[in-house]
Every structure is written in structure tokens, then in C-alpha cells.
Amino acid sequence: MLRDMLLMGTALLDKNRAHIDSLNVFPVPDGDTGSNMLMTMQSAVREIREVRGEKVGDIAAAASLGSLKGARGNSGVILSQIFRGFARALAGKEEMDGAALSSALSMGTEAAYKAVMKPKEGTMLTVSRVMAESVAEAADSGANVYKLVDVMLESGEAALRHTPEQLPVLKEAGVVDSGGKGLLTILRGFKMVMDGEEVDDYVEEERESFSQAASSEEGADLEGLEEIEFGYCTEFFIIHLDDASCEADLDKFRDKLVKIGDSVVVAKDEGVIKVHVHSNYPGKIIQLALRLGEVDRIKIENMREQNRGLLEHLRKTEKENAVVAVSAGPGLEEVFRALGVTGIIPGGQTMNPSVESISRAIRKANARNVFVLPNNPNVLFAARQAAQLASRNVKVIPTTTMVQGISAALAFSEDVSADDNAAQMEDAMNGVLSGSVTYAVRASKVNGSSIAEGDIIGLLDGDIAEVGSGVDEVTLKLLRRMMDKKKGDAVVTLFFGEGMDEQNAKAIIDQAETEYPRGEFTVQYGGQPLYYYLISVE
């Protein structure tokens, strides 16, 4: 079963490789995390297939040796060390019970942290650690191996979702950690075997990021080319280790690598050392390694040259005009993308994007003229600051609501001048009424009216227009007020938010259609937090 689990994990990783690659933040040679982890696992599978025994210890040992042999990039080497811990924990064992699984996860995490010279939280290391801690706690309570696998995945998913809060670069790129996602994909294969599922039965979640992630080529931000401090990605094995070398020599080797490079991973298993480092002196790295043994399978890649190639690709594919928009909610993001918006910046109420995150989206748009839709009054100033810092022509369309932003995006055309586009988009923005329905977070008085905490409130173009106790009641009242302003003849879209029911939204629209037969009504999933409904009337 353990053999099948590892094979299933590899197959699932293969199926989702492109998705995991798309979560990468940096366009460098070792940045294709899904591909690197897949090649690492494929090497492990080759070793596993050679095992004739039926002990879990034999399978784990093969997975450890094979993954180390085929380890690619940081993520691959870290993965190999996790399996090294598995091998140690399961050595000599015929079966893996709950206690053994807990020990395997703990020892794998320990080995992985030790191999990375400067561990960062918010990476696959964090995901592995959180899983190990959660499983250990459940194992102490007597949970069996089946329950522990559930705990492992649930805690791992929670840790993965939290990675953008731990690593700012993930939050700005709008993605979760790709290595953590890859690790969870492999381990999900474990559960599928235990549950008797096939790889084709598994449907990947539609969204693993809270914004559109850039692939390693398309939409990459390479204006920071000069920021690459270490230009060569160097990987190799040290084999036939010198008999006189010891663990202290290996520690000294690691310390020297840290002084002349970064992304240092040095992993040892079964008399073989795998080395991965970014530096400006690959020759010196190899010279240092030769003091420990013979070097083998050397791979050196020039990361600056790859970035130059990507930069040239961007120059050749640069567009004349592009739009980026701040958005909150998966449904709204899909609407913006369908309207041709190039970049989505996660944000909105309670989560206003920084000047830097807006600037990054402007650069990734890869266009001579970039139109920014802030879609929130609190984001407007940051958007204007980002426009001033940009190295291209940026026009901020002063949208203060999501529905204004959608109207502006509808009016955008790739084929007209920047000035004409800005004028068209502002005209469209000013022609729409924006309604929203939410709740009062505290008691207050507005325009002489008392509002209690928890009351449902309807806002029209940012001003409180309706107050009541029921969401449907307030939504209908607000919609009537908006339709009366348009004299009953308008195009209306009702966007239902996070946790709201589509059928309920349709019932509201059915009532409005009865009252306003000349109107044109549509229900659309927005998925926005905090607001039950957003209403566009134009």
C-alpha cells in the first residue's frame, strides 16, 4: 500500500504540475516547483519499482535514495530530506501504524529544516512542520493511521492557506507557497489510495491563489533584473566521500557556502551529498566540494541569462494598452478577467493593497499604457502613488466601487488611444449607480437616524440609503431606490457575495422584474466578502 501511495502521489503531482508551477513567484531556473518536484518523485518511483520486499522500511528507503538522486531545485532537495526522515522512522518496519506515521513526519520535517541553511516560514517547510505537529498531537490521543492522514491533510491545507501571511512576497504575488502545495498534492495521493480512489477521480480546487498568478514567462516582472545578487544556480552530487571526512567537515562546507551564496541546501544520505546553491562563483563551490569527495552530475545555470531571455520575450510581446484592477471575490475576479483585465490585485474593504503591490501589477501588465481601476476610495491614493512611480504611462481611473470598475472595464478598448480610453472608461464609470448591502459593525447615528449594531444597511454610491433587519428587505428597498433614479429603465446586475445563495438572489431579481418590466436583470456570482450583495444599475 505504501508503494501505491507514493506512485499515486507522483501521478497526482504530474496531473497538477502546471498548476503548481503557476504558483511560482520568481522566474528563475529553479523556479518551476511543480516540474522539479515531479522529476524528484519520478526518480524515487524508479527506485521503488526495483524493491522486491514487502516491508514499509524497504519502500521508504528506496523513496529516500531515489528522491535524493533525482532531486531538482530547492523544493526537490527539501522533498528528498522529508523522505529521508520517513526512511529513518520506518527503518526495519514491516507496517506503518499511527505512531510510525507521526514519527516519519516529525523526522522528515527535522531533516528538511536541517538541510536548509536559512529556513523561512511560509514555505513547504512550514507546511511539513504544522502537519507533523498536528499529527503528533492526534497520535498521542490514540488516533489510528487513517484518522491521522485526514489530520495531516487538513492541517497542511490550513498551513498552506496561511503562507501568504508569513511570506510577504507570496502575498504581493497573490499566491500560496508552491512547494507546500506540491507536498500536499503528493500526500493527498496517500489518502486516495487508502480511500480506493483513482487519480482521475480527483478534481483540483479551482483556486489555490487569491489573485491571478504569473507564470514563469507570461506576466513576469523582470524590471528588477539587477536585483539578482547571485547569478548561477549550481547543483551537483558529492560521491565516494573521503574516508577522513566527518559531519563537522560537512557543517564547515555549509557555512562557507552561506558566505558566498544563498538558497543553500546540503543534504546527505547513504554516502551521497546533494548540493544546491545560488552564487557568483560556481567554480569555487565545486573546489570546496572536492575536499569532501568526488563531484558528479554537475548542473550550472545562468539565472541572469534566463532573465534576459524572458525580458526580451516581454519586450517582443509588449501590448499598447492594458488594464489592472483591484478586486475582492473569485466571481468578481472572473468577471474582470472576462472583460480583458490583465492583472488582478487582491484587495477591497479591510484589505487595501500597498503601493508596491499595485506597482508590481502595473509592471506585470507589460503594456505601454496601463489603466488602473482602484475600485475603492481607500485604494485611490495608493494607486496614484504607484502611477507616479511607474516607468510607463499609467492612468488611474478613479473608480470607488467594484461595479464602477466593471463598467469602466467594459468600456476599455485595446485599439484606441490612451486618452480616448481614459475618457471612455470615466464616462462609463460615471454612468452607473453602485449599491451594496452589508451589516453595521457598531451602533451609530447617520443623518439623524440611529443604526444598531448588526442592522442591515444598504449603501448607494457610498452613502447609507436604507436600514433594516433583513437582507432581502433592505436589498429590495435599495434596488427600488436605484431603479426609480433611472425611471425604471436600466440594466441591473445583482452580484451575490460569499456564503450567499444564488436561488435567493434570483428570488430578489424576480420580484424586481415584476415591479420594473422595462428593466433588464441579471444575477452574477461575486463571492465578495463582507457584502451580501453588490448592485449595478446603468
Image: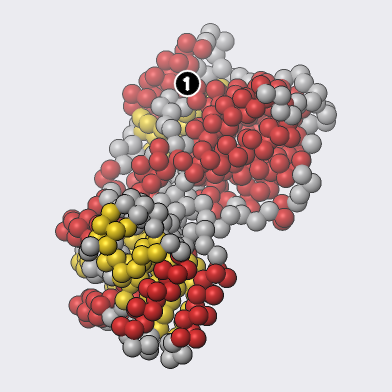
The image position of residue 373, as x and y in percent, is 29, 66
Report whether 353 appears left or right of 239. left
Residue drawn at the location 59% of the way across and 29% of the way down:
134
Report whether 365 appears left or right of 241. left
The residue that label 1 is drawn on is 290
Q: Nearer the viewer, residue 21 or 73?
A: 21
Residue drawn at the location 48% of the way across and 16% of the way down:
250
The image position of residue 133, as x and y in percent, is 57, 26
Indicate whether 298 appears above or below 290: below
Residue drawn at the location 68% of the way across and 35% of the way down:
149
Q: Nearer the viewer, residue 406 or 284?
A: 406
Local SS, label 1: loop
Q: Residues within 10 Å of mark 1 (few under 14, many from 20)?
A: some
Colour approach in the figure: secondary structure
Identity, as a three-letter code, of the amino acid under mark 1: Leu
Indicate whether 104 appears above or below 227: above
Residue drawn at the location 54% of the way across and 22% of the way down:
110
The image position of residue 136, as x and y in percent, is 62, 24
In which quadrant of the rendered view does residue 389 lie? bottom left
The image position of residue 514, as x and y in percent, is 50, 86
Asked whether residue 315 appears in the rendered view, the answer is no
